[in-house]
């Protein structure tokens, strides 16, 4: 039984699968890193938080009903605001649950749920989580779809291989700061590199317009997309260097495919998790870190030129980041969940 917030994207996927699902109300707690006083006096933010608190209370009631009807042996919670009411209901009903933390620092929901969790699966080595109960931690890694590390498909555009191939991944929604730097320096970048630019839904139209304005020879060196699905694996294989945010899914894919990467995390005031993920990997020599407040076209072009012109650094980044990939992450995670379920069955017997 899959419990979700009932969003259009996830329910469309679930409808085409064999998985039963239920939707519940759930709310976020908004924090924008502007300081406690400014956030307290922000009426709009506080009003939204109050509304979403009510949603979470309703979600707790819905979750209790679902749990009583479905009678699970164990509940798996991936983190995030939807899992919070489910986990609280499970704790009060005496149903064991396992949580998985993708990032190197725990999110708000997982911090709350970790106190009553039977097990906590994590994506980074256990030593990275000093504030968590070490006895509950299991280093499973972050699951990546098998085709990312089994497929040897190299079927992406070749462009002009006299230049390094760079994939700039601004996310499915489009990271405005990254997109702006690409647009403002598109002639400089396409002069030196072949650019595959995933500009997101919000940036793709401007990306296409910018390509239209380029000289013919440089048009051939710039390929904009809103987002990629099945083609994403081929895009990774094509890339010599990946430029991306610090989300754990992107980092896991980069690790799986051993790609040298420059990571530009969201600023800490917006998403502290991305920054911490990137800092952790950068300290291990697995990625290059470029802060958003230091991001401009010439700096990005220089970083790409230095890295692409240094094969030993490229190889070192590729081999080091791959060490953080756990190909059996999903199996390890399943074993933890099944072990907790088995213990629960034993206690019930």
Image (tube, helix red, strand yellow):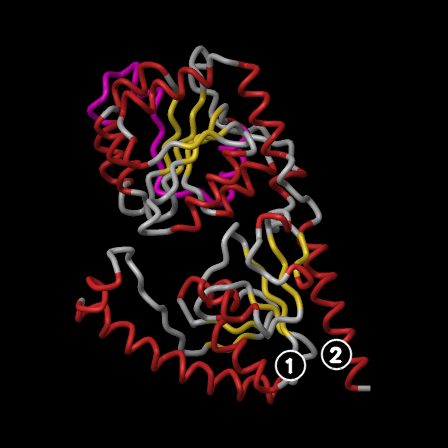
Q: Please provide percent x and percent y for residue 283.
A: 52, 34
Q: Which residue is mark 1?
A: 95
Which residue is rendered at x = 82% and y = 86% of the image? 349
Q: Considering only vertical position in the picture, is 120 above or below 235?
A: below
Q: Nearer the viewer, residue 256 or 152?
A: 256
Measured along the vertical axis of the image, is residue 124 above or below residue 160? below
Specify few, some or many for label 2: CA neighbours under 10 Å numbering under 14, 14-19, or 20 or more: some
* Circle on res. 344: 2
Report, in whole angstroms, how far the alpha carbon at label 1 lies from the one at label 2. 8 Å
User: For mark 1, does the 10 Å Cα neighbourhood hold few (<14), some (14 to 19), or many (20 or more) residues?
Assistant: many
1 and 2 marks in contact (CB < 8 Å): yes
Q: Position of residue 5 (x, y in %)?
A: 43, 72
| Secondary structure at numbered mark 1 | loop
In the image, taking residue 30 as reference, residue 282 lies left or right, namely right
| Quarter in which the N terminus is drawn | bottom right
Determine the residue positioned at 72% across, 55% down.
331
User: Magenta part of the protein: which range?
Assistant: 212-237
């Amino acid at each position: 039984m899959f419990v979700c917030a009932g969003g259009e994207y996830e329910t469309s996927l679930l409808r085409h699968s064999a998985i039963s699902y239920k939707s519940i109300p759930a709310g976020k707690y908004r924090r924008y890193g502007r300081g406690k006083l400014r956030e307290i006096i922000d009426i709009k933010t506080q009003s939204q938080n109050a509304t979403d608190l009510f949603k979470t209370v309703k979600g707790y009631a819905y979750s209790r009903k679902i749990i009583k009807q479905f009678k699970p042996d164990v509940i798996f919670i991936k983190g995030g605001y939807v899992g919070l009411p489910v986990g609280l209901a499970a704790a009060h009903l005496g149903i064991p649950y396992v949580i998985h933390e993708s990032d190197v620092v725990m999110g708000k929901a997982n911090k709350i749920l970790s106190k009553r969790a039977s097990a906590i699966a994590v994506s980074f080595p256990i030593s990275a989580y000093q504030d968590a109960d070490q006895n509950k931690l299991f280093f499973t890694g972050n699951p990546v779809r098998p085709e990312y590390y089994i497929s040897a498909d190299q079927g992406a555009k070749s462009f002009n291989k006299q230049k390094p191939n760079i994939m700039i991944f601004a996310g499915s929604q489009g990271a405005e700061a990254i997109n702006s730097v690409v647009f403002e320096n598109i002639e400089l970048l396409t002069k030196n590199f072949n650019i595959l630019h995933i500009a997101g839904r919000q940036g793709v139209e401007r990306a296409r317009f910018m390509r239209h304005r380029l000289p013919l020879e440089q048009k051939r060196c710039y390929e904009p997309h809103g987002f990629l699905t099945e083609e994403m694996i081929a895009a990774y294989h094509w890339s010599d260097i990946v430029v991306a945010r610090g989300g754990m899914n992107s980092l896991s894919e980069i690790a799986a495919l051993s790609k040298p990467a420059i990571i530009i995390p969201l600023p800490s005031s917006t998403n502290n998790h991305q920054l911490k993920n990137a800092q952790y990997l950068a300290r291990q020599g697995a990625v290059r870190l470029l802060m958003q407040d230091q991001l401009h076209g010439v700096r990005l072009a220089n970083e790409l030129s230095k890295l692409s012109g240094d094969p030993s650094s490229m190889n070192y980044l590729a081999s080091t980041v791959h060490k953080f990939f756990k190909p059996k992450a999903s199996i390890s995670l399943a074993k933890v969940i099944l072990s907790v379920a088995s213990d629960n069955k034993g206690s019930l017997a």
